[in-house]
Every structure is written in C-alpha cells, then in structure tokens.
C-alpha cells in the first residue's frame, strides 16, 4: 500500500517521551561507566524498545487506516534517522581501532562493523561471550546488538501489518498473538540458553510489541476501557482528596506515571545481571515505560520531571549518546587492560555527551530535515555499504596484521584468539556419531569410534583442544557445558540462573551406554572458581555457587566433593578407567600483556614477565587439592593426574615457556599447552 497524494503522517510530538529517552540513555551510560552504582542500568535498553514500538506502531496503525502508508517513505525516514550518527561512530571506531587494537582485536572489530552496518550485531554476538561477561567489555561495538533488534523489528513489523491490513485481519489480534508468543519464548529460553535469549529478536520483540499495544489503545479508545479509566480516576481522587472528583483523568494519569517511575527505579537499583535477563525481570522496565507513556504529557511526573529542558535536550541527543558512550568506555578499558580509573570513565562520559551533541547538530539534523532527499539516501546507503565492506576486508585480512608486525610476534599473538572450534559444537557428533546434546551444551568428536570421553566445563574443552584439532592422535569425544563441573546430584547457579549442570553426568552415562568403545573418561573443570566465591587475578568475585538437588546443609566445598565423588563412583561401576585432571594453574592476567605493550594507554605500562609465584598458586588450590584427595579416597579406583610441573617450578609458574604461550586468556590453557598435557598423560599410560 502506498500513498499517491499524502505524506506519511506522524504522531504529535511529546516532550515527555524525549525526557523518558533521557532517563533510558543515562541509565545505560551509568551502568556501563559504574555498574556498581546502578546495577540494573542496562534496562534502559528495554525502555527504548517500548518507546520505539509505541512511536513506530502509532505511525503504522494510523497511516494504514488513513490509506496514507508508504513502505518506501517509511524506510527512507528510518535511513535518515539512523544512518548519519551510526556512520560517524562506525568510522570513528574504525579509526581508533587502527591505532589502539592488536591484530586479532581489530579483526573482530571489523567483523562487528560489518554486522553493525547490516544491522545483525545481535546475531554476530550470539555465539561470542554473553553481554554481561568480562570479555564483552572489550568489544567497542557490543552495544549495537540493540540497534540490530530494533531494525529487525522495523523491517518485519511494517510488512506484516501491511499484509494483514490488505487481507482485512484484525491488527490488534495479530499484535497480541505475536507478543504472547515472543514473551513465552523469552520465559522458556532464559533458563535454557540465557545468551541466546538476550540477543534473539524473537525473545525480545514482545517488548516492542507492548509499545505497539499501547499505540493501538491510544488510537482506538474503547468505551468500556474509558469507563474503567473514569471509575479508577474517581476512586483515586476520592482516596486522596475530600473534594468532588473533577473527572479530568489527572488523578489516574498521575498514579500511572508515578507507578511507572517506581517500577523503573526498582529496575535500576534492584535488578542485576545475574538474575537472568530478560526473562520475567524485563516486565518491570517494560511495564514501567508503558505506564509512563500511557499517563500522557499532562501527568505531573511527565510534565515537571520528564518535560524539563535538560531532560528533553538529553532525550534529543539520546541516540548519538548511546552510540558514542560505549566505544569510548570500551577503548579506555582496552588501553588500561582492565577497569579504568574513575576520572578516565567520567571523562569518557563527558566526551560522549559532547560528541553526541555535535553529531546531532552538525550531522543528524541537517540530513534528517534538509533537502536533496534522494541524493542523501543514495550517499548514506553507499557509505554504509562501504563501511560494511571495509569491516569485512579487515576481518578477512586478520586485522591488517602488517600494522603491528614490526613490534610483536604475530604467531604468538594469534594464540591468544579464542579457539571457538574447540569450545562450540561443530556438528561432528551429529555427523560421525548421529548424536546430539541439548541447547547450550558442547559436543565434539574426531572419530566414529571414540576411546576417550572428556567431560567438564570450558577447561575440559581447552584440555581436549589438541585432540579435537588432530595435534595429538587420541580418538576423543567431548561433552561439556561452559561453567558446568560434572557434579552428580548437584548443579551450579550463575548468579540466579540455574545452569542445569546436573544434566552433564547424566548425558555422560548415556554416551557410555551408547558407545562401548569408550574405555577412559577424563574429568576436568575449573575447580576453585565454583566453591571459593573468588575469581583469580584480574577477575573479581565469582558469581558461581553449587547447590544440591536434594536439600543439603553442606558447604560449597563439600558439595563439590560429593558431586564429583558420586559421578566417579558411577563411572567406576561401569568398569571405566576414570582420570581426574587437577586443573592447571590459572594465569591471572591477559597473556597479551606478556607479548606487546599497546601504542596508546593512559598509564605507563611495561611488558609483563608472564609469571606468578608458586606460593600464590598453591594458596589458591590448597582446598581444591584437599577435595581431590578426598574424592580419590572415596573412590580408590580413581586415577589423578597433576600437570603442575609442566607449568611451574619450585618458585614460579609461567604463562610463556620455550617461546610459546601456555594460555590463550587469563585461565584457559592454549592448544600448545593441551598438547603438552595430553602427551604427558599418554606417557604415564593414563590415555590410550
């Protein structure tokens, strides 16, 4: 449907919605700059989703009904709204990356620039670290995932509505049905695969569709709904005042706005990343935004708080501010190789506000509201295509490695790139064994007749990496799950999310029953992290905790020992050789610091020695090793392998030996270290 004689109409401007945008963007900026101050600031994105759904759907519903809808004009306006600021930030981020990033990091930035230009950042990030993981903080374009969600909504929703309108379907029913399906997928997915649920459009669209429902209700006030609103308004007025209700709706509007503000305040200060988000917790910011918008511009909170000039001004620059703030904070973190000092983060936020205002005044407004529309659209699309192509070229050329060849051993630096081929299912189990695991689990094999089964978390995946890549000739199979030690009768919470780790031993038993060629089972996990409550080195506190499936008063360490013992006992009863690998020492620092000093940083830095004292490692592993001794005592047939002599001498533990890295990050061993360990285990007849 297109208009011949009519332009696309837009809803009346509301200053309070710009004020709500300012609250949303400030909460996100505060969370990224000081997460310990505003624990739930990330919910600002959910507020943006509701606002976008409301405004876009108001345009779509009203223009479809007035026969003035033009799909072409709709997308032209979206391009003029989004492309200018995004292009400025993509170009600036690329230029900064040329100067600051190492080759592997720059290659990843190129990939993310291409994804950002295509508005599929959420899909590109899906199989990488989760949004709340430490690794995510060094991705300067991480925040574009939300823009990807919105743009995917803008592409799908108008077309669906247009087709439904042509076929005379009920648009309200369509909106309700799709919103309910999306919400159900969100609630179901958050327990099974939190990262996918966070980034997936089908588990996020319900938030935008809540704004769509509000738009429909605003355009089509139902008599019964109006009667109910009137009754509520009178009741609220009588509850608060002695005077006769004026019937102007202000009492209800004020109550809605204040309720919405309360829900947002609850979200900002009470919701935490570890709760499992979005899930049920996203209801608070979504409902809060709906209440505030539905209250209307005359509600006291909307009129006095949201419509004041500073709030409206911040709302007007909220989009470029959202785009600018994260790259600046992320580059600061990269240059400082950790959390920057408070003054650096404050400076980054101030600079992002200045750049956002300049972008809005000098780039966004002239392009959105000036003339020469066709030329602008052609130029914007061409520039975006060029940025996408440049990003892909950078990614395909390994981050333009020639930039740093003169000052770094690139072969060593390449070893610090996360080896995804050994940490994610690659289809080998399905192809060779006709076997698969559920969502989130990892299954890898290099043969149709495996002899060794590796079971555990990402450290077991790192241990198996040399076998998976064929560098050590072991017929291996791995089943594992990130953040899951194989504890029978027990599971692990990551924050408030049950990772379902108890399924791992159960799956292992099914594998052994199905593949009798497996005679050796190797167990490995990052032991101390699960029961100590502490990370290591550059990490902060661990948010892992163990719990028993049946009520228990045991300590975390006792549950770790009992869960492992029960699993080992079950394996020994199957007449399998069981090898418990004491986890290698964690490095505790980024191994790249051992290889190169960045050309730009705020603090003077020197090359790290990549060593740590043996006493520090012994202290970290003391309780862990006692637990392993107890597990072996409980199960005399268990064989224990200790690789510490490959990593440490009497005084020191090393991250770099014989010119090769033993780690690819601060706690996972490298593929070369996996070769050392597996070959040493074979020499001791622990592996075939």
Image (tube, helix red, strand yellow):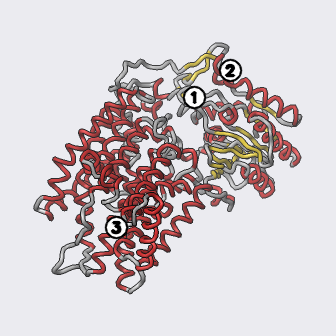
Q: Is residue 119 left or right of residue 38?
A: left
The location of residue 21, given as percent across then percent down, is 33, 52
User: Which residue occupies 43% across, 60% down?
Assistant: 242
**Residue placed furthest toward the bottom:** 168
Please name the residue that numbered disc 1 is placed on. Answer: 662
Marks 1/3: CA–CA distance: 72 Å
User: Which mark is nearer the camera, 1 or 3?
Assistant: 3
Q: Secondary structure at mark 3?
A: loop
Marks 2/1: CA–CA distance: 21 Å
Marks 3/2: CA–CA distance: 70 Å
**Residues under numbered marks 2 and 1 in contact, where contact means CB atoms less than 8 Å apart:** no
User: Which residue occupies 59% across, 28% down?
Assistant: 536
Q: Can you tell which quarter of the image residue 431 is in?
A: bottom right
User: Which residue occupies 32% across, 70% down?
Assistant: 58
Q: Nearer the viewer, residue 641 or 133?
A: 133
**Earlier-in-chain disc, 3 versus 2:** 3
Please name the residue that numbered disc 2 is placed on. Answer: 619
Q: Nearer the viewer, residue 658 or 608?
A: 608
Would you place residue 405 above or below residue 550 in this image?
above
User: Which mark is nearer the camera, 3 or 2?
Assistant: 3
Please name the residue that numbered disc 3 is placed on. Answer: 248
User: Which mark is nearer the camera, 2 or 1?
Assistant: 2
User: Which residue occupies 69% across, 20% down?
Assistant: 618
Question: Which numbered marker is on residue 607?
Answer: none
| Number of residues whose C-alpha sits closer than 10 Å to that of mark 1, classed few (under 14), some (14–19) or many (20 or more) | many
**Earlier-in-chain disc, 2 versus 1:** 2
């Amino acid at each position: 449907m297109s208009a011949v004689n009519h332009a696309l109409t837009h809803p009346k401007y509301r200053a309070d919605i710009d004020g709500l945008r300012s609250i949303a963007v400030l909460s996100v900026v505060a969370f990224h700059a000081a997460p310990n101050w505003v624990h739930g600031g990330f919910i600002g994105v959910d507020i943006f989703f509701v606002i976008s759904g409301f405004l876009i759907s108001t345009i779509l519903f009203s223009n479809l009904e007035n026969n003035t809808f033009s799909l072409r004009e709709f997308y032209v306006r979206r391009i003029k709204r989004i492309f200018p600021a995004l292009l400025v930030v993509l170009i600036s981020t690329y230029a900064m990356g040329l100067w600051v990033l190492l080759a592997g990091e720059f290659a990843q930035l190129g990939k993310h620039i291409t994804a950002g230009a295509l508005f599929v950042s959420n899909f590109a990030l899906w199989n990488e670290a989760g949004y709340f993981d430490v690794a995510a903080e060094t991705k300067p374009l991480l925040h574009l995932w939300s823009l990807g969600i919105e743009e995917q909504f803008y592409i799908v929703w108008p077309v669906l509505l247009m087709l439904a309108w042509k076929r005379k379907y009920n648009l309200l029913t369509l909106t309700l049905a799709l919103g309910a399906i999306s919400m159900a997928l969100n609630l179901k997915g958050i327990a099974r695969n939190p990262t996918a649920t966070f980034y997936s459009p089908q588990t996020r669209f319900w938030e935008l569709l809540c704004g769509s429902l509000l738009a429909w209700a605003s355009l089509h006030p139902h008599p019964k709904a109006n009667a109910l609103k009137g009754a509520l308004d009178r009741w609220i007025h009588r509850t608060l005042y002695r005077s006769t209700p004026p019937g102007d709706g202000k009492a209800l509007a004020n109550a809605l706005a204040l309720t919405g503000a309360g829900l947002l305040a609850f979200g900002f200060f009470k919701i935490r990343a570890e709760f499992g988000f979005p899930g049920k917790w996203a209801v608070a910011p979504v409902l809060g935004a709906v209440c505030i918008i539905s209250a209307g511009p005359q509600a006291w909170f909307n009129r006095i708080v949201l419509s004041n000039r500073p709030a409206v001004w911040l709302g007007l620059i909220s989009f470029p501010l959202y785009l600018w703030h994260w790259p600046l904070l992320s580059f600061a973190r990269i240059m400082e190789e950790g959390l920057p000092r408070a003054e650096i983060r404050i400076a980054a936020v101030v600079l992002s506000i200045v750049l956002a205002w300049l972008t809005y005044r000098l780039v966004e407004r002239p392009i959105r509201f000036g003339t020469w529309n066709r030329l602008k659209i052609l130029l914007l699309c061409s520039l975006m295509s060029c940025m996408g192509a440049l990003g892909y070229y950078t990614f395909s050329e390994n981050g333009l490695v020639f930039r740093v060849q003169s000052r770094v051993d690139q072969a060593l630096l390449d070893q610090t790139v996360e080896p995804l081929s050994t940490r994610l299912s690659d289809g080998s189990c399905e192809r060779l064994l006709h076997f698969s695991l559920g969502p989130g689990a990892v299954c890898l094999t290099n043969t149709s007749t495996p002899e060794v089964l590796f079971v555990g978390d990402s450290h077991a995946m790192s241990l198996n990496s040399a076998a998976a890549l064929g560098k050590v000739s072991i017929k291996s199979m791995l089943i594992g799950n990130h953040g899951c030690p194989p504890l029978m009768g027990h599971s692990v919470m990551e924050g408030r999310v049950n990772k379902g780790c108890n399924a791992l031993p159960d799956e292992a038993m099914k594998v052994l029953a199905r593949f009798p060629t497996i005679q050796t089972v190797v167990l490995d996990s990052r032991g101390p992290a699960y029961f100590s409550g502490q990370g290591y080195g550059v990490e902060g506190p661990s948010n892992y905790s163990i719990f028993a499936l049946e009520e228990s008063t045991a300590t975390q360490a006792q549950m770790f020992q009992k869960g492992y013992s029960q699993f080992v006992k079950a394996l020994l009863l199957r007449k399998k050789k069981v090898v418990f690998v004491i986890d290698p020492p964690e490095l505790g620092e980024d191994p790249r610091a051992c290889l190169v000093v960045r050309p730009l940083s705020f603090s003077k830095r020197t090359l790290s020695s990549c060593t740590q004292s043996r006493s520090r490692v012994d202290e970290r592993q003391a309780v862990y090793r006692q637990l392993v001794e107890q597990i072996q005592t409980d199960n005399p047939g268990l064989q224990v392998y200790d690789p510490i002599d490959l990593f440490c001498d009497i005084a020191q533990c090393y991250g770099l030996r014989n010119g090769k890295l033993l780690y690819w990050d601060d706690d996972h061993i490298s593929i070369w270290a996996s070769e050392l360990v597996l070959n040493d285990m074979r020499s001791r007849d622990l592996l075939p």
